[in-house]
Image (cartoon, grey):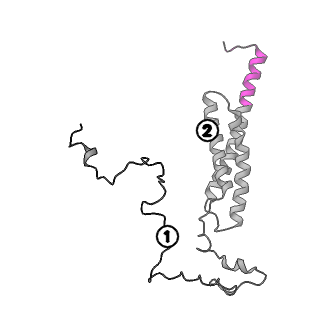
């Protein structure tokens, strides 16, 4: 026999574990299936309001030659603040110039990193193009300094890279002509 203090004996008789009856459906309420609300206080839901007519919109009258649906699309906050946009070409030129500078510094200590040195002419061209576009649209872009810096890094690194490559070529040619060995 079981002890009367056991939890199974203290559970009310109405509690039945799930699955004790083969006809139990876990998705149906024990009180039965749901029914439509009824009674004296229940009324049918109100019909939705009619759709708005195509006419003047809260943004003003439509512009001639503009479709009626386009009249509702107006800028929410207005134009961007002057100088708040960044020109992507300026950022690209700056990054390419920094890569060329880094490869020149690393090239002095270990070896010439040719792919990095080839970034310099692209930084020069990309920076010059971005600078022209930024100056053509005054007040739109705010990173003219990035374009200028990228362009000048490109110019300087192109010249220094050419000098380093010519110097390395001269050293290799000198070693080849004189039969001098580093070993």
- Residue 176 lies, with reference to residue 118, above or below; the image says above
- Closer-to-camera residue (75/56): 56
User: Residue shown at 45%/63% (left/top)?
Assistant: 32
What mark, if any, has residue 162 been given in the picture?
none
Q: Which residue is mark 1?
A: 35
Task: Examine the residues drawn in magenta and state their main secondary structure.
Answer: helix
Q: Which residue is mark 2?
A: 102
Q: Secondary structure at mark 2?
A: helix
Residue 100, image x, y percentages: 66, 40
As for residue 143 lying within the magenta part, the answer is: no
User: Cα distance, mark 1 to mark 2?
Assistant: 76 Å
Q: Secondary structure at mark 1?
A: loop
Residue 28, image x, y percentages: 48, 59
Label 1 neighbourhood size at 10 Å, few (<14), some (14-19), many (20+)? few
Residue 87, image x, y percentages: 66, 58
User: Residue shown at 68%/30% (left/top)?
Assistant: 112
Q: Which residues are magenta?
A: 166-182
């Amino acid at each position: 026999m079981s002890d009367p203090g056991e939890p199974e004996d203290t559970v009310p008789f109405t509690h039945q574990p799930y699955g004790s009856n083969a006809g139990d459906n876990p998705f149906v309420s024990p009180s039965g299936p749901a029914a439509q609300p009824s009674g004296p206080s229940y009324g049918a839901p109100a019909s939705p309001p009619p759709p708005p007519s195509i006419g003047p919109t809260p943004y003003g009258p439509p512009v001639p030659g503009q479709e009626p649906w386009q009249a509702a699309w107006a800028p929410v906050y207005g134009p961007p603040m002057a100088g708040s946009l960044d020109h992507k070409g300026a950022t690209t030129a700056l990054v390419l110039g920094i890569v060329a500078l880094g490869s020149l510094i690393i090239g002095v200590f270990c070896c010439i990193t040719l792919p990095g040195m080839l970034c310099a002419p692209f930084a020069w061209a990309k920076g010059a193009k971005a600078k022209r576009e930024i100056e053509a649209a005054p007040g739109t872009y705010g990173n003219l300094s990035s374009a200028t810096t990228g362009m000048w890094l490109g110019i300087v690194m192109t010249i220094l890279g050419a000098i380093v490559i010519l110097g390395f070529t001269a050293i290799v040619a000198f070693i080849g002509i004189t039969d001098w060995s580093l070993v």
